[in-house]
């Protein structure tokens, strides 16, 4: 990894850690609603867009009720992480108006305090923090006191900021940030001793080797301490502080330069040259190296080595000229869009990929010149918004591609529906229901007649009906044979058999009647069900389906129109953001050019002055 | 010369090194930031509405069938991939990234599949592949018979650590 990348990556780490306040830690509870779990899945991958979408879809369809106030708190936190501060503020305020548990309210006050701080409303932020009643989870607790320290620093209440430090318990990183901020602020105010105390505390922290964030912060503290010591004329202390900056770290150049200045302050010019000569071997693109190139001949002059100084002034002039030519080319490249092309994410399909890319800087000719800019919070925020806008554009393009297929799908469904409709409408089975109902009514009337006449024989079934028919025929035959012989025995048998059947049917009349009634009830139910199905079918083809197709069409048209409108707006804002990014880069490069021009003038001035001196010395020589 | 050189450098270092707190204050391009916030909100709302429309169109409630995957602890099993078959037909498969596994281990629930299924009984088999205890290759299956009614059906595939057996457990929960 090129040096500038290392530098910027570590600086990125520092600033990210100081701002990852939106990290949401859900209250420990089981997942009672899968949609909440799904939102967490996206949230933990920092896919904020998808996470917000899932939660808001749930909110619109069927709000999540089984997870307490956590989904609402999560949504607020998601908006905060996604840079939608006003929406986040609305949610936290709403939560605070509700009967949310104290744990949730405390968290909401904390987030609200952060929002107010970001808006520059420090008094309001402080008031919000004061509303927190109980300790927050460890990470947030550290962030809470760090925030309060920063508020005090913004309000110039330094003693209170110092007093706040006693509240830190766990999370040493937050305490270290607070101490560092305090040290830098006091140093700027000229309160050198106090500044040294706090910067020294961070600078001498014992940090595990795998804690890159804290190690980077410790380097920064030592660097700031070293320069503060130089300001306080404490050269030896400065050398010690610079000595604690990791040689392999991204700040080693600045530390080497500082060591040189500390020796210079002690008038130990020979030792001052040692680190600067080391710097001289490093890439001259580095502003620290550029400064060393000017400091070397100046110090050589003091060591009464004018010829060597002359050579190094010449080297500095040539280097600055070369750098200025390169810088002009880079400036031209940036002005013609080179950096922006490099800054474009490689892929917009994977939402999480965008965030991972944040740690790496594009491989472009301008990047090394913009390392400081790229590490600055302003550029990061602007670049983040730029990428988010590109992602939003990408989403809208995705939906725009989908809309025609939805239209086609609806059209085909409607065509298929029309085809089926004709078949269904002409289906003869639908007309049969009327005949069935007529038949049912006849059966009901017959049953009623049987009941009223108590006609047990009418309830004969199966074999009984056959026997009854045969008995009826026998009765007719017996009537015909009357007067043609003695058939009394047969008549007696007939009477007994018919009597037996009648007795059976009459004794079972109630049971058989009940069974028939039961069957009639079943028949009525089936008819009713069929009638309901037929009616539903009719309702479906006559009213429901056409209105569904119509509703979908209206929804689709409305969404397509919103899509078009939003796409235009996004394009305009993205163009503005692009210009702003470009302006930031160009301004930074121009600033570097001014520095280089300044160095060049000074080097040329030193050169001229030295030539004059040597010339005068030569003329003055006997 | 000495003073001015020192001054240049000190001035430069203080203005260029980002201060952890002051850098959090937003940049002065407030107008553009506000417009971006508004746009984000509008796009999110539109995305939500289109998401709902898509679900309504493609996965009607009466045939909708969704499979989720969750992990409790996940210390005894390092998930690599999952395959789901319904009635012997592959309907979903996923290869996990480290980031996704971490999100699952922290309590996130992944929506693995959404599709349509006719009413009636169906057999679902899920195959989990990864590394088990002692970093051994591990492939396990979990089977369930689903009775799909006209209501949407939600199935959760669960990977849990069985502390007593020191083995991962794979189970299926049907949500009503």
Image (tube, rainbow, N blue to C red):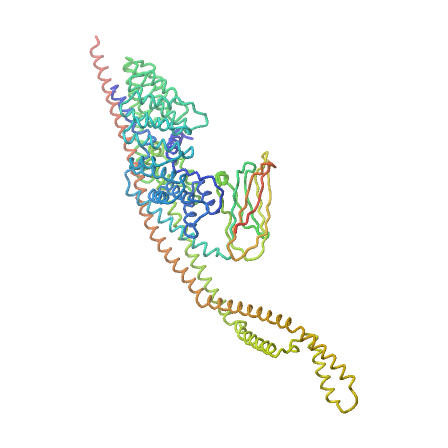
Looking at the picture, tell me which residue is in the foreground, A348 or A91: A91
What residue is drawn where x is 25% and y is 20%?
B3
Q: Tell me which corner region of the image, top left, top right, bottom left or bottom right, holds residue A45.
A: top left
In the image, residue A245 sits, relative to residue A135, either above or below, namely: above
Q: Tell me which corner region of the image, top left, top right, bottom left or bottom right, holds residue A374.
A: top left
Looking at the picture, tell me which residue is in the foreground, A342 or B164: B164
| Residue B102 shown left or right of residue A194 in the figure | right
Provide residue A518's location: percent of width, then percent of height: 60, 69
In the image, residue A411 sits, relative to residue A278, either above or below, namely: below
| Residue A293 shown left or right of residue A100 in the figure | left
Provide residue B96's location: percent of width, then percent of height: 51, 41
Q: Tell me which corner region of the image, top left, top right, bottom left or bottom right, holds residue A107.
A: top left
In the image, residue B100 sits, relative to residue A224, either above or below, namely: below
Looking at the rendered image, the quarter that the N terminus of chain B falls into is top left
Looking at the picture, tell me which residue is in the foreground, A364 or A119: A119
Q: Residue furthest bottom?
A: A483
Provide residue A275's location: percent of width, then percent of height: 36, 19
Count the numbered circles shown: 0
Looking at the picture, tell me which residue is in the foreground, A281 or A359: A359
Provide residue B88's location: percent of width, then percent of height: 59, 51
């Amino acid at each position: 990894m090129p040096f500038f990348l290392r530098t910027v990556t570590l600086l990125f780490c520092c600033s990210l850690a100081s701002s990852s306040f939106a990290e949401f830690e859900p209250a420990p509870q089981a997942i009672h609603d899968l949609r909440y779990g799904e939102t967490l899945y996206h949230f933990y991958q920092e896919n904020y867009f998808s996470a917000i979408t899932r939660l808001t879809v749930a909110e619109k369809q069927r709000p999540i009720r089984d997870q307490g106030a956590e989904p609402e708190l999560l949504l607020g936190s998601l908006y905060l992480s996604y840079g939608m501060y006003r929406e986040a503020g609305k949610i936290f305020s709403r939560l605070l108006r509700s009967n949310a548990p104290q744990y949730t309210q405390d968290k909401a006050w904390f987030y609200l305090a952060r929002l107010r701080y970001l808006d520059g409303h420090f008094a309001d932020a402080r008031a919000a923090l004061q509303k927190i009643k109980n300790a927050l989870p460890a990470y947030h607790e550290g962030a809470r006191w760090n925030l309060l320290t920063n508020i005090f620093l913004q309000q110039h209440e330094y003693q209170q900021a110092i007093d706040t430090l006693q509240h830190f318990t766990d999370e040493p990183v937050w305490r270290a940030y607070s101490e560092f901020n305090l040290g830098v602020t006091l140093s700027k105010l000229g309160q050198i001793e106090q500044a040294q105390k706090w910067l020294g505390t961070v600078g001498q922290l014992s940090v595990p080797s795998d804690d890159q964030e804290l190690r980077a912060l410790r380097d920064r503290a030592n660097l700031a301490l070293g320069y503060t010591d130089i300001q306080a004329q404490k050269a030896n202390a400065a050398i010690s502080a610079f000595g604690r900056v990791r040689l392999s770290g991204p700040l080693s150049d600045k530390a080497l330069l500082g060591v040189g200045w500390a020796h210079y302050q002690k008038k130990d010019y020979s030792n001052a040259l040692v680190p600067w000569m080391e710097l001289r071997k490093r890439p001259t693109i580095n502003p620290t190296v550029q400064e060393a190139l000017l400091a070397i001949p100046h110090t050589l002059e003091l060591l009464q080595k004018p010829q060597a100084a002359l050579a190094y002034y010449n080297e500095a002039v040539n280097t600055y000229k070369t750098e200025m030519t390169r810088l002009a080319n880079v400036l031209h490249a940036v002005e013609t869009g080179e950096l922006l092309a490099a800054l474009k994410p490689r892929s917009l399909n994977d939402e999480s990929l965008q965030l991972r890319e944040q740690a790496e800087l594009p491989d472009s000719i301008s990047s090394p010149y913009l390392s400081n800019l790229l590490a600055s919070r302003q550029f990061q925020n602007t670049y983040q918004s730029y990428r988010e806008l590109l992602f939003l554009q990408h989403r809208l393009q995705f939906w725009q591609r989908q809309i025609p297929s939805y239209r086609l799908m609806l059209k085909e469904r409607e065509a298929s529906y029309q085809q089926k409709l004709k078949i269904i409408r002409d289906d003869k089975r639908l007309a049969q229901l009327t005949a069935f109902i007529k038949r049912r009514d006849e059966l009901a009337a017959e049953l009623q007649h049987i009941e009223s006449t108590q006609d047990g024989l009418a309830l004969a079934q199966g074999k009984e009906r056959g026997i009854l028919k045969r008995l009826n025929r026998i009765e007719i035959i017996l009537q015909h044979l009357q007067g043609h012989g003695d058939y009394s025995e047969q008549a007696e048998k007939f009477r007994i058999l018919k009597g037996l059947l009648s007795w059976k049917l009459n004794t079972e009349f109630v049971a058989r009647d009940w069974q028939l009634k039961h069957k009639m009830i079943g028949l009525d139910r089936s008819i009713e069900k069929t009638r309901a199905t037929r009616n539903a079918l009719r309702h479906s083809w006559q009213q429901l389906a056409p209105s569904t197709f119509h509703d979908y069409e209206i929804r689709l048209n409305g969404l397509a129109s919103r899509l078009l409108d939003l796409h235009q707006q996004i394009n305009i804002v993205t163009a503005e953001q692009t210009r702003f990014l470009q302006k930031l880069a160009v301004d930074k490069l121009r600033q570097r050019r001014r520095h280089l021009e300044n160095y060049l003038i000074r080097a040329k001035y030193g050169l001229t002055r030295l030539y004059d001196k040597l010339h005068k010395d030569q003329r003055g020589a006997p | 010369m000495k003073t001015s050189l020192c001054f240049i450098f000190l001035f430069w270092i203080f203005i260029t090194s980002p201060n952890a707190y002051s850098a959090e204050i937003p940049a002065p391009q407030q107008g553009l930031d506000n417009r971006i916030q508004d746009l984000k909100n509008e796009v999110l709302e539109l995305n939500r509405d289109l998401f709902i429309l898509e679900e309504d169109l493609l996965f009607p409630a009466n045939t909708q069938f969704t499979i989720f995957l969750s992990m409790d602890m996940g210390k005894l099993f390092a998930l690599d991939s999952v395959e789901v078959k319904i009635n012997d037909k592959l309907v979903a498969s996923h290869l996990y990234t480290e980031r996704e596994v971490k999100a699952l281990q922290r309590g996130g629930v992944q929506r693995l599949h959404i599709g349509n299924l006719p009413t009636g009984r169906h057999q679902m088999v899920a195959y989990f592949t990864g590394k088990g205890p002692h970093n051994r290759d591990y492939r396990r299956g979990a089977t369930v018979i689903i009775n799909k009614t006209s209501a949407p059906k939600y199935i959760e595939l669960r990977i849990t650590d069985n502390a007593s057996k020191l083995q991962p457990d794979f189970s299926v929960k049907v949500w009503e």
